[in-house]
Image: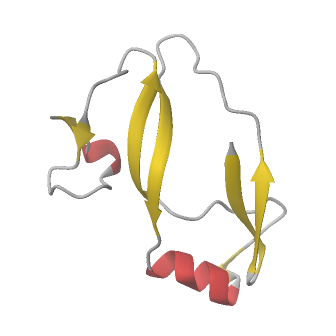
Amino acid sequence: MRVARLHAKGDVQLHEEDCPEPAEGMSLVRVTDVGLCGSDLHWFADGQIGDAQIGQRPLVLGHEISRVVEAGPLARVVFRAPDGTASGGERMRRR
C-alpha cells in the first residue's frame, strides 16, 4: 500500500509498505479518501505545532478519512459519523 509521510517541514515522501493483517477479532480498514485540516497544514508548513515537532519517525497526516472495512468481523458494515461527515473517530456508528 502507498503511504505519504511527512519527514520534515515541507518534505512529504511516498512509501510502499506491506498491508497489515488484522489480528483475530480486529478488522482491516481501507482508507478511500483523506481530508487535511488546519493542523495538518501547520505540520507541513512549519514542521511543528506549538512545542510539538516532527521527531525521529515521520508523520502520516490526514485524520479525516472515508473508509471501507475490507476484512474481519465488521466487513461489509457501513459506518458513518453522526453528523454525516467522513470523520468521527470513536463516534462512528453503524448505519
Residue 65 position (above or below residue 75): below
Front position in the image: 75 or 52? 75
**Residue 80 appears left or right of 68:** left
Residue 11, percent from left and from top: 78, 78
Residue 24, percent from left and from top: 54, 10
Camera sees residue 51: no
Which residue ends up furthest to the right in the rendered image? 56
Residue 69 position by quadrant: top left
Front position in the image: 81 or 53? 81
Residue under the image location 46 percent in, 49 percent down: 32
Residue under the image location 32 percent in, 23 percent down: 76
The image quadrant where one finds the N terminus is top right
**Residue 83 appears left or right of 58:** left
Front position in the image: 85 or 32? 32
The image quadrant where one finds the C terminus is top left
Residue under the image location 45 percent in, 16 percent down: 72
Camera sees residue 71: yes
Residue 34, percent from left and from top: 46, 60
Residue 52 position by quadrant: bottom right
Residue under the image location 37 percent in, 21 percent down: 75
Q: What colour scheme governs how the chains and residues are painted in the rendered image of this protein?
A: secondary structure
